[in-house]
Every structure is written in structure tokens, then in C-alpha cells.
Image (tube, rainbow, N blue to C red):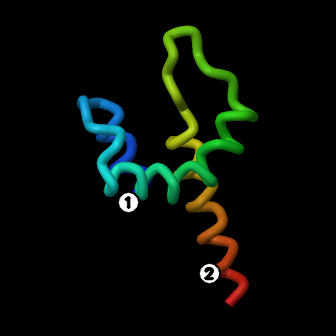
Amino acid sequence: MLIMARVFLSWISHDPYNQFIQLLYQITEPILKPIREILPMQSMGVDFSPIAAFFLLGFVKKLLLTAV
């Protein structure tokens, strides 16, 4: 949900100094940054790291649920 909130914030103008927004970035950046380093930025500047994070987190969740 936090990654989705970050995606929505990227579509609107917001105050980067807001404490909530800073907390949101601090929580989601450790997940998105490694994906961004692997996936190249597309020519139009589209960041696909949130989409990849959704797939990866879903895969990890499925692995954990089958391991239990």
C-alpha cells in the first residue's frame, strides 16, 4: 500500500519536506532503489520499479505462504 501511495504522489505536486512524505520515502526507498539499479530507466523517464516491486513482493508472499 505504501508503494502505491508513493506512485500516486509522483503524479501530483507535493511538499517533499512534509514529514509524512519523508517517512513514506524512507520506508519505500530500500525496496525500490535496488530494483531501480537493475532496471534501466526508459527513454521517456518512466520508473517501472514500483511495478517490479509489486511482482517481487507477491512472489515472496507466495513463497512464504507455501513454506508454512
Q: Nearer the viewer, mark 2 or mark 1?
A: 1
Q: Is residue 38 above or below residue 19?
A: above
The reply to whether callout 2 and callout 1 are in contact (CB within 8 Å) is no
Q: Which residue is mark 1?
A: 1
Residue type indicated by callout 1: Met
Q: Quadrant where the C terminus lies?
A: bottom right
- How packed mark 1 is, by other alpha carbons closer than 10 Å (few <14, some 14-19, many 20 or more), is few
Residue 39 location (% of width, % of height) = 69, 30
Q: Is residue 24 above or below residue 11?
A: below
Secondary structure at numbered mark 1: loop
Residue in the picture at 59% in, 45% down: 32
Q: Position of 21 compared to 29: left or right?
A: left
Q: Position of 54 compared to 20: left or right?
A: right
Residue in the picture at 51% in, 59% down: 27
Q: Quadrant where the N terminus lies?
A: bottom left
Residue 37 location (% of width, % of height) = 73, 34
Residue 4 location (% of width, % of height) = 37, 50
Give the total number of marks visible in the rendering. Answer: 2
Residue in the picture at 64% in, 42% down: 33
Residue in the picture at 35% in, 33% down: 10
Q: Quadrant of residue 49?
A: top right
Q: Is residue 25 above or below residue 27?
A: above
Nearer the observer, 56 or 37: 37
Q: Quadrant of residue 34?
A: top right
Outermost residue, front direction?
17
Q: Is residue 65 above or below residue 5?
A: below
Residue type indicated by callout 2: Leu
Q: Which residue is mark 2?
A: 65
Nearer the observer, 11 or 53: 11
